[in-house]
Amino acid sequence: MIMQINEYILIFVSKYESKQDHLLHFSKIIDGLNIDTVQNESISNEKDQLQVSKWQFSLSGEQLTYQELSSMFHEYIDSKTKIDFYLAPLEHYNCQPKLATFDMDSCLIKNECIDEMAYTMGVVDKVSDITRRAMEGHYNFDQALMERLALLRGMTVEQLEDVWTRIELNAGAFTLVQTLKSLGFTVALVSGGFTFFSQRIGSRLGIDHVYSNELEIVNGKLTGEVIGPIVNGDMKLTVLKELSRHLALGQQETIAMGDGSNDRFMVGHAHLGIAYHAKQILKSSTPFHINHTPLHTLCLFLSATIPHLKQQDSEVRRQLLNLTTKENTQSIHQITENSALLNQYAHQLRISPSQ
Protein backbone atom coordinates (compact mmCIF):
# COMPACT_ATOMS: atom_id res chain seq x y z
CA MET A 1 0.00 0.00 0.00
CA ILE A 2 1.37 3.42 -1.02
CA MET A 3 1.05 5.97 1.76
CA GLN A 4 -0.48 9.28 0.69
CA ILE A 5 1.69 12.35 1.34
CA ASN A 6 0.14 15.80 1.25
CA GLU A 7 2.38 18.86 1.01
CA TYR A 8 1.32 22.17 2.54
CA ILE A 9 2.48 25.77 2.72
CA LEU A 10 1.94 27.74 5.93
CA ILE A 11 2.62 31.45 6.46
CA PHE A 12 2.28 33.31 9.76
CA VAL A 13 2.03 37.13 9.79
CA SER A 14 1.80 39.12 13.01
CA LYS A 15 2.52 42.51 14.57
CA TYR A 16 3.20 41.43 18.13
CA GLU A 17 4.40 37.82 18.17
CA SER A 18 8.12 37.17 17.62
CA LYS A 19 9.70 34.54 15.40
CA GLN A 20 10.17 32.42 18.52
CA ASP A 21 6.45 32.75 19.25
CA HIS A 22 5.69 31.61 15.70
CA LEU A 23 7.84 28.50 16.16
CA LEU A 24 6.25 27.72 19.52
CA HIS A 25 2.70 27.99 18.18
CA PHE A 26 3.54 25.90 15.11
CA SER A 27 5.07 23.17 17.28
CA LYS A 28 2.02 23.04 19.55
CA ILE A 29 -0.41 22.79 16.64
CA ILE A 30 1.38 19.99 14.81
CA ASP A 31 2.17 18.01 17.96
CA GLY A 32 0.94 14.48 17.41
CA LEU A 33 0.56 14.79 13.64
CA ASN A 34 2.47 12.52 11.28
CA ILE A 35 4.74 15.22 9.82
CA ASP A 36 7.45 13.90 7.48
CA THR A 37 9.51 16.96 6.55
CA VAL A 38 9.48 20.54 7.70
CA GLN A 39 11.24 23.44 6.00
CA ASN A 40 11.12 26.73 7.91
CA GLU A 41 12.06 30.18 6.63
CA SER A 42 11.82 33.53 8.41
CA ILE A 43 10.89 36.08 5.75
CA SER A 44 11.30 39.02 8.15
CA ASN A 45 13.82 40.05 10.79
CA GLU A 46 13.26 41.19 14.36
CA LYS A 47 13.40 44.90 13.43
CA ASP A 48 10.54 44.62 10.95
CA GLN A 49 7.12 45.91 11.97
CA LEU A 50 5.52 42.69 10.73
CA GLN A 51 6.92 39.28 11.59
CA VAL A 52 6.53 36.72 8.81
CA SER A 53 7.40 33.02 9.00
CA LYS A 54 6.92 30.36 6.33
CA TRP A 55 6.81 26.57 6.54
CA GLN A 56 6.59 23.87 3.92
CA PHE A 57 5.70 20.51 5.40
CA SER A 58 4.47 17.07 4.41
CA LEU A 59 1.65 15.27 6.19
CA SER A 60 1.67 11.50 5.73
CA GLY A 61 -1.27 9.17 5.63
CA GLU A 62 -4.96 9.90 5.37
CA GLN A 63 -5.42 11.11 8.92
CA LEU A 64 -6.64 14.64 8.05
CA THR A 65 -8.24 16.33 5.07
CA TYR A 66 -7.19 19.88 4.21
CA GLN A 67 -10.46 21.18 5.65
CA GLU A 68 -9.83 19.35 8.94
CA LEU A 69 -6.24 20.59 9.11
CA SER A 70 -7.34 24.16 8.40
CA SER A 71 -10.00 23.95 11.10
CA MET A 72 -7.38 22.70 13.56
CA PHE A 73 -5.15 25.71 12.84
CA HIS A 74 -8.07 28.15 13.09
CA GLU A 75 -9.25 26.67 16.39
CA TYR A 76 -5.84 27.18 17.97
CA ILE A 77 -4.65 30.41 16.33
CA ASP A 78 -7.94 32.32 16.44
CA SER A 79 -8.37 31.66 20.16
CA LYS A 80 -4.78 31.90 21.43
CA THR A 81 -2.90 34.37 19.19
CA LYS A 82 -3.10 37.53 17.11
CA ILE A 83 -1.52 35.83 14.10
CA ASP A 84 -2.97 35.90 10.60
CA PHE A 85 -2.09 32.79 8.64
CA TYR A 86 -2.26 31.22 5.21
CA LEU A 87 -2.43 27.43 5.03
CA ALA A 88 -2.99 25.66 1.72
CA PRO A 89 -1.90 22.67 -0.32
CA LEU A 90 1.32 23.35 -2.21
CA GLU A 91 -0.42 23.38 -5.59
CA HIS A 92 -2.77 26.17 -4.44
CA TYR A 93 0.12 28.30 -3.29
CA ASN A 94 2.16 27.88 -6.46
CA CYS A 95 -0.54 29.28 -8.74
CA GLN A 96 0.08 32.97 -9.42
CA PRO A 97 -3.13 35.03 -9.70
CA LYS A 98 -3.56 37.99 -12.06
CA LEU A 99 -6.91 39.59 -11.14
CA ALA A 100 -7.71 40.99 -7.68
CA THR A 101 -11.15 42.31 -6.69
CA PHE A 102 -11.89 44.22 -3.49
CA ASP A 103 -14.86 45.46 -1.55
CA MET A 104 -14.69 49.12 -0.47
CA ASP A 105 -16.60 49.91 2.74
CA SER A 106 -14.90 48.53 5.88
CA CYS A 107 -12.35 46.89 3.58
CA LEU A 108 -10.21 49.27 1.52
CA ILE A 109 -11.61 52.13 3.61
CA LYS A 110 -12.42 52.35 7.32
CA ASN A 111 -15.88 53.82 6.79
CA GLU A 112 -19.31 52.54 5.86
CA CYS A 113 -20.18 55.42 3.53
CA ILE A 114 -23.94 55.03 3.90
CA ASP A 115 -23.60 55.23 7.69
CA GLU A 116 -21.54 58.41 7.31
CA MET A 117 -24.29 59.80 5.09
CA ALA A 118 -26.85 58.89 7.72
CA TYR A 119 -24.82 60.66 10.40
CA THR A 120 -24.96 63.84 8.34
CA MET A 121 -28.74 63.47 7.91
CA GLY A 122 -29.42 62.67 11.57
CA VAL A 123 -30.69 59.12 10.97
CA VAL A 124 -27.53 57.20 11.82
CA ASP A 125 -29.10 54.83 14.38
CA LYS A 126 -31.77 53.60 11.97
CA VAL A 127 -29.40 53.25 9.02
CA SER A 128 -26.53 51.66 10.98
CA ASP A 129 -28.84 48.99 12.37
CA ILE A 130 -30.00 48.05 8.87
CA THR A 131 -26.37 48.08 7.64
CA ARG A 132 -25.24 45.77 10.44
CA ARG A 133 -28.05 43.27 9.85
CA ALA A 134 -27.45 43.31 6.09
CA MET A 135 -23.69 42.70 6.44
CA GLU A 136 -24.34 39.85 8.88
CA GLY A 137 -26.69 38.24 6.37
CA HIS A 138 -29.91 38.80 8.32
CA TYR A 139 -31.42 41.19 5.78
CA ASN A 140 -31.87 41.08 2.00
CA PHE A 141 -29.23 43.45 0.62
CA ASP A 142 -31.41 45.06 -2.06
CA GLN A 143 -34.22 45.71 0.39
CA ALA A 144 -31.77 47.04 2.99
CA LEU A 145 -30.18 49.40 0.47
CA MET A 146 -33.46 50.88 -0.69
CA GLU A 147 -34.77 51.29 2.87
CA ARG A 148 -31.63 53.17 3.85
CA LEU A 149 -31.67 55.35 0.75
CA ALA A 150 -35.29 56.26 1.45
CA LEU A 151 -34.13 57.63 4.81
CA LEU A 152 -31.51 59.71 2.98
CA ARG A 153 -33.87 61.20 0.40
CA GLY A 154 -33.22 64.93 0.02
CA MET A 155 -29.53 64.78 0.96
CA THR A 156 -27.64 67.41 -1.04
CA VAL A 157 -24.47 67.09 -3.11
CA GLU A 158 -22.83 69.55 -0.70
CA GLN A 159 -23.59 67.16 2.16
CA LEU A 160 -22.12 64.27 0.15
CA GLU A 161 -18.97 66.34 -0.28
CA ASP A 162 -18.83 66.77 3.49
CA VAL A 163 -19.04 62.98 3.90
CA TRP A 164 -16.19 62.60 1.41
CA THR A 165 -13.89 64.63 3.68
CA ARG A 166 -14.34 61.99 6.41
CA ILE A 167 -13.35 58.98 4.30
CA GLU A 168 -10.15 57.25 5.47
CA LEU A 169 -8.12 54.38 4.02
CA ASN A 170 -7.55 51.25 6.04
CA ALA A 171 -3.91 50.56 6.93
CA GLY A 172 -2.05 48.95 4.06
CA ALA A 173 -4.55 49.90 1.33
CA PHE A 174 -2.15 52.11 -0.63
CA THR A 175 0.72 49.62 -0.34
CA LEU A 176 -1.57 46.73 -1.27
CA VAL A 177 -2.86 48.24 -4.51
CA GLN A 178 0.48 49.72 -5.57
CA THR A 179 2.28 46.42 -4.98
CA LEU A 180 -0.28 44.41 -6.94
CA LYS A 181 -0.16 46.92 -9.79
CA SER A 182 3.65 46.80 -9.86
CA LEU A 183 3.40 43.02 -10.21
CA GLY A 184 1.10 43.25 -13.23
CA PHE A 185 -2.26 42.57 -11.57
CA THR A 186 -5.53 43.95 -12.86
CA VAL A 187 -7.25 45.42 -9.79
CA ALA A 188 -11.00 46.01 -9.45
CA LEU A 189 -13.12 47.66 -6.77
CA VAL A 190 -16.52 45.95 -6.61
CA SER A 191 -18.71 47.62 -4.01
CA GLY A 192 -22.29 47.77 -2.81
CA GLY A 193 -21.48 51.40 -1.97
CA PHE A 194 -21.70 54.39 -4.26
CA THR A 195 -19.80 55.66 -7.30
CA PHE A 196 -19.70 59.14 -5.74
CA PHE A 197 -17.04 57.75 -3.38
CA SER A 198 -15.75 54.58 -5.07
CA GLN A 199 -14.61 56.25 -8.29
CA ARG A 200 -12.70 58.90 -6.35
CA ILE A 201 -11.03 56.23 -4.26
CA GLY A 202 -10.28 54.02 -7.25
CA SER A 203 -8.77 56.83 -9.30
CA ARG A 204 -6.50 57.86 -6.42
CA LEU A 205 -5.29 54.34 -5.64
CA GLY A 206 -4.74 53.40 -9.30
CA ILE A 207 -7.51 50.80 -9.52
CA ASP A 208 -8.37 49.64 -13.06
CA HIS A 209 -12.11 48.96 -12.73
CA VAL A 210 -14.78 50.29 -10.38
CA TYR A 211 -18.28 48.79 -10.11
CA SER A 212 -20.71 50.19 -7.52
CA ASN A 213 -24.13 51.78 -7.19
CA GLU A 214 -24.86 55.12 -8.84
CA LEU A 215 -26.97 57.46 -6.73
CA GLU A 216 -29.79 59.22 -8.55
CA ILE A 217 -29.40 62.97 -8.03
CA VAL A 218 -32.01 65.46 -9.26
CA ASN A 219 -31.64 69.21 -8.74
CA GLY A 220 -28.65 68.58 -6.49
CA LYS A 221 -30.46 66.19 -4.12
CA LEU A 222 -30.75 62.42 -3.65
CA THR A 223 -34.05 60.96 -4.81
CA GLY A 224 -33.63 57.80 -2.73
CA GLU A 225 -33.10 55.68 -5.86
CA VAL A 226 -30.11 54.25 -7.72
CA ILE A 227 -29.47 54.29 -11.46
CA GLY A 228 -29.04 50.87 -13.05
CA PRO A 229 -28.78 47.42 -11.45
CA ILE A 230 -27.92 47.15 -7.76
CA VAL A 231 -24.43 45.86 -7.03
CA ASN A 232 -25.34 43.12 -4.55
CA GLY A 233 -23.70 39.80 -3.74
CA ASP A 234 -24.85 38.12 -6.95
CA MET A 235 -23.69 41.08 -9.03
CA LYS A 236 -20.27 41.05 -7.36
CA LEU A 237 -19.81 37.42 -8.39
CA THR A 238 -20.96 38.24 -11.92
CA VAL A 239 -18.43 41.09 -12.14
CA LEU A 240 -15.61 38.78 -11.02
CA LYS A 241 -16.58 36.13 -13.56
CA GLU A 242 -17.06 38.59 -16.43
CA LEU A 243 -13.80 40.42 -15.78
CA SER A 244 -12.05 37.04 -15.71
CA ARG A 245 -13.64 36.10 -19.02
CA HIS A 246 -12.80 39.50 -20.54
CA LEU A 247 -9.15 39.13 -19.47
CA ALA A 248 -9.04 35.45 -20.55
CA LEU A 249 -8.20 34.33 -17.01
CA GLY A 250 -9.20 31.15 -15.22
CA GLN A 251 -10.71 30.92 -11.75
CA GLN A 252 -7.30 29.85 -10.41
CA GLU A 253 -5.91 33.27 -11.39
CA THR A 254 -8.28 35.30 -9.22
CA ILE A 255 -8.22 36.92 -5.77
CA ALA A 256 -11.16 38.51 -3.94
CA MET A 257 -11.38 40.27 -0.58
CA GLY A 258 -14.32 41.55 1.43
CA ASP A 259 -15.79 41.83 4.91
CA GLY A 260 -19.54 41.23 4.77
CA SER A 261 -22.35 38.93 3.75
CA ASN A 262 -22.70 40.37 0.24
CA ASP A 263 -19.04 39.49 -0.47
CA ARG A 264 -19.40 35.77 0.21
CA PHE A 265 -20.15 34.67 -3.37
CA MET A 266 -17.26 36.68 -4.83
CA VAL A 267 -14.85 35.63 -2.09
CA GLY A 268 -16.03 32.02 -2.18
CA HIS A 269 -15.53 31.79 -5.95
CA ALA A 270 -12.03 33.26 -6.13
CA HIS A 271 -9.01 30.96 -6.01
CA LEU A 272 -7.75 33.00 -3.06
CA GLY A 273 -10.68 34.54 -1.21
CA ILE A 274 -9.82 36.65 1.83
CA ALA A 275 -12.18 37.58 4.67
CA TYR A 276 -10.81 40.88 6.00
CA HIS A 277 -11.85 41.79 9.58
CA ALA A 278 -15.01 40.06 8.49
CA LYS A 279 -18.44 39.07 9.73
CA GLN A 280 -18.76 35.40 10.67
CA ILE A 281 -20.95 34.61 7.66
CA LEU A 282 -18.09 35.56 5.34
CA LYS A 283 -15.44 33.79 7.40
CA SER A 284 -17.45 30.61 6.91
CA SER A 285 -17.05 31.00 3.13
CA THR A 286 -13.24 30.84 3.06
CA PRO A 287 -10.39 29.46 5.19
CA PHE A 288 -8.28 32.56 4.50
CA HIS A 289 -8.75 35.39 7.01
CA ILE A 290 -6.97 38.64 7.89
CA ASN A 291 -8.08 39.60 11.39
CA HIS A 292 -5.19 41.51 12.97
CA THR A 293 -2.70 42.81 10.40
CA PRO A 294 -2.91 45.39 7.57
CA LEU A 295 -4.50 44.88 4.18
CA HIS A 296 -1.18 44.28 2.47
CA THR A 297 -0.76 41.05 4.44
CA LEU A 298 -2.39 39.62 1.32
CA CYS A 299 0.85 40.42 -0.55
CA LEU A 300 2.86 38.67 2.16
CA PHE A 301 0.72 35.57 1.63
CA LEU A 302 1.91 35.75 -1.98
CA SER A 303 5.47 36.71 -1.11
CA ALA A 304 7.21 33.41 -1.78
CA THR A 305 5.27 32.69 -4.96
CA ILE A 306 5.86 35.85 -6.97
CA PRO A 307 9.54 36.00 -8.04
CA HIS A 308 9.81 39.77 -7.50
CA LEU A 309 8.90 39.31 -3.84
CA LYS A 310 11.30 36.42 -3.27
CA GLN A 311 14.28 38.78 -3.34
CA GLN A 312 15.19 39.27 0.30
CA ASP A 313 16.66 42.74 -0.36
CA SER A 314 13.97 44.00 -2.73
CA GLU A 315 12.38 47.37 -2.06
CA VAL A 316 8.96 45.79 -2.46
CA ARG A 317 9.71 43.29 0.33
CA ARG A 318 10.93 46.05 2.64
CA GLN A 319 7.86 48.14 1.94
CA LEU A 320 5.58 45.23 2.73
CA LEU A 321 7.27 44.40 6.01
CA ASN A 322 7.32 47.99 7.24
CA LEU A 323 4.36 50.30 6.88
CA THR A 324 6.18 53.50 6.00
CA THR A 325 5.50 56.85 7.63
CA LYS A 326 3.84 57.85 4.38
CA GLU A 327 1.49 54.86 4.58
CA ASN A 328 0.60 55.57 8.19
CA THR A 329 -0.16 59.26 7.72
CA GLN A 330 -1.26 59.60 4.11
CA SER A 331 -4.90 60.46 3.59
CA ILE A 332 -6.86 59.48 0.50
CA HIS A 333 -7.38 63.22 0.12
CA GLN A 334 -3.63 63.81 -0.26
CA ILE A 335 -3.44 61.54 -3.30
CA THR A 336 -4.01 63.19 -6.67
CA GLU A 337 -7.12 62.13 -8.54
CA ASN A 338 -6.34 60.39 -11.85
CA SER A 339 -8.68 61.88 -14.47
CA ALA A 340 -7.65 59.27 -17.04
CA LEU A 341 -8.91 56.52 -14.75
CA LEU A 342 -12.18 58.37 -14.14
CA ASN A 343 -12.66 58.47 -17.90
CA GLN A 344 -11.75 54.78 -18.08
CA TYR A 345 -14.48 53.93 -15.56
CA ALA A 346 -17.03 55.71 -17.74
CA HIS A 347 -16.11 53.43 -20.66
CA GLN A 348 -15.30 50.19 -18.83
CA LEU A 349 -16.80 46.78 -19.61
CA ARG A 350 -20.59 46.91 -19.16
CA ILE A 351 -21.82 44.05 -17.01
CA SER A 352 -25.45 43.09 -16.45
CA PRO A 353 -26.80 40.98 -13.57
CA SER A 354 -26.47 37.21 -14.10
CA GLN A 355 -24.66 37.84 -17.36
Image (spheres, rainbow, N blue to C red):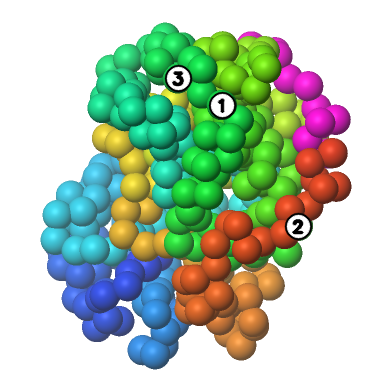
> Of helix, strand and loop, which one carries label 2?
loop
One can see residue 59 in this view: no
User: What amino acid type should be assigned to the residue bearing mark 3?
Assistant: Leu
Q: Quadrant of the C terminus?
A: top right
Q: Is residue 347 magenta?
A: yes
For the residue pair 262 and 34, the one nearer the viewer reads as: 262
Residue for point 40% across, 11% down: 147
**Left or right: 126, with 142 as reference point:** left
Q: Which residue is mark 3?
A: 152
**Left or right: 62, with 194 as reference point:** left
One can see residue 72 in this view: yes
> Of helix, strand and loop, which one carries label 1?
loop
User: For the residues marked 2 and 1, what is the alpha-carbon distance in whole angstroms?
Assistant: 39 Å
User: What amino acid type should be assigned to the residue bearing mark 1?
Assistant: Thr
For the residue pair 102 and 132, the one nearer the viewer reads as: 132
The percent coordinates of residue 40 (x first, y second) are 39, 77
User: For the residues marked 3 and 2, what is the alpha-carbon distance in whole angstroms?
Assistant: 40 Å
The percent coordinates of residue 240 (x first, y second) are 64, 30
> Of helix, strand and loop, which one carries label 3?
loop
The answer to whether residue 146 is above or below residue 51 is above
Circle 3 crowding by C-alpha within 10 Å: few under 14, some 14–19, many from 20: many
Q: Is residue 280 magenta?
A: no
Residue for point 73% across, 20% down: 351
The answer to whether residue 185 is above or below residue 99 is below
Within the image, what quadrant is residue 343 found in? top right
Circle 2 crowding by C-alpha within 10 Å: few under 14, some 14–19, many from 20: few
Within the image, what quadrant is residue 236 found in? top right
The part of the chain drawn in magenta is 344-355
Q: Which residue is mark 2?
A: 184
Q: Which residue is mark 1?
A: 156
Residue for point 47% across, 49% down: 166
